[in-house]
Amino acid sequence: MTVPDLGELRRGVIERRAMRPKGPEVARVQEVTGPGGLRLRHYFPAEERRPLVVFLHGGAWVICDLDSHDRLCRRIAMACGVEVLAVDYRLAPEHPYPAAVDDAVAVLRWARPVGVAGDSAGGYLATMACLRLRDAGEELPAVQILACPNTDLTLSKDSVRDKGSGYSLDADFLQWAVRQWVPDDGLRADPVVSPLRVPDLREMPATVLVTAEHDALRDEGDAYAERLAESGVRVIHRREPDLEHGFVQNNDPAANAATDRLLTDARTLLSEAHTSHA
């Protein structure tokens, strides 16, 4: 296996960001300092206040930032009619597990949002933070929105083998990224780091979870949606055909349509949650 060059990976994020179109206009964007000095970015779809969703970006725990997911945050804000608070959490390998989970939990405690959302590793962090709060007996967001999330750090599902070459997420890179996040091989099967292996998922937030057909993480995402539903959690789950990992960041017609479907589902659950707490 060729070891990725982390500096090159992070430079690539900047280059790809420059090539993406800007997201929809929002009423206002505000840079915020959060708990522990975390950088946050607050998107307002309108001047009047709206329910809040905390967003955690993807990037295999090692790359991406507030700017890389700016377009997606704008889309969430406008499509769902919510304020979005994006989190610039600490990255591995400089800050391995549990640093980013700690950051996510701190922001959820501080902001008390109606929902938490994330793509890929950000989806993992979203549900890990919810599990931490649930186990502590603390208030949870009413909704979690998970796009192609990591849920099993053993990477033992068939899709890692079947879809881990020739598509957007390579199995060798995934193995490397997991090592940066959880250096201890023996810990990766532990429920403390792999949410799919948590024995009891009751009382988790209502969930929108979307996976993609040609994604190495597909099977673990599908399995997590099934486990949540079996635990009595309301789940809207869709496997998007013909798409690859990270489609929520893409700008082709099929990816945009699938992201629109995800945001429509998210808006449904967020509206229900806001109405029930009004």
Image: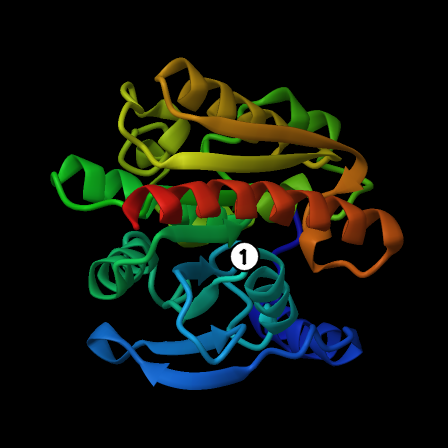
Query: On the rendered structure, is 104 left or right of 260?
Result: left
**Residue drawn 39% across the image and 61% down it:** 51
Q: Quadrant of residue 113?
A: bottom left
Q: Quadrant of residue 164?
A: top right
**Residue drawn 36% across the image and 68% down it:** 90
User: What's under tag 1, amino acid-wise?
Assistant: Gly
Give the x, y percent position of residue 262.
Answer: 64, 44
**Residue drawn 23% across the image and 62% down it:** 106
Query: On the rendered structure, is 51 left or right of 76?
Result: left
Instruction: Report if residue 175 is visible in the image.
Output: no
Instruction: Report if residue 196 is visible in the image.
Output: yes
Q: Which residue is mark 1?
A: 58
Give the x, y percent position of residue 61.
Answer: 47, 57
- Image vertical order of residue 102 relative to residue 15, above or below: above
**Residue drawn 31% across the image and 52% down it:** 97
Residue positioned most to the left: 137
Give the x, y percent position of residue 224.
Answer: 47, 26
- The structure's colour scheme is rainbow
| Frontmost residue, 143 versus 160 | 143
- Image vertical order of residue 247 relative to residue 153, above or below: below
- Image vertical order of residue 42 relative to residue 229, above or below: below
Give the x, y percent position of residue 110.
Answer: 21, 65
| Frontmost residue, 64 versus 178 | 64
Residue positioned most to the top: 230
| Frontmost residue, 106 versus 165 | 106
How many numbered markers are drawn?
1
Secondary structure, mark 1, is: loop
Query: On the rendered structure, is 159 left or right of 6?
Result: right
User: Counting other residues with Cα less than 10 Å from the Cα at mark 1, is it few (<14), some (14-19), or many (20 or more)?
Assistant: many
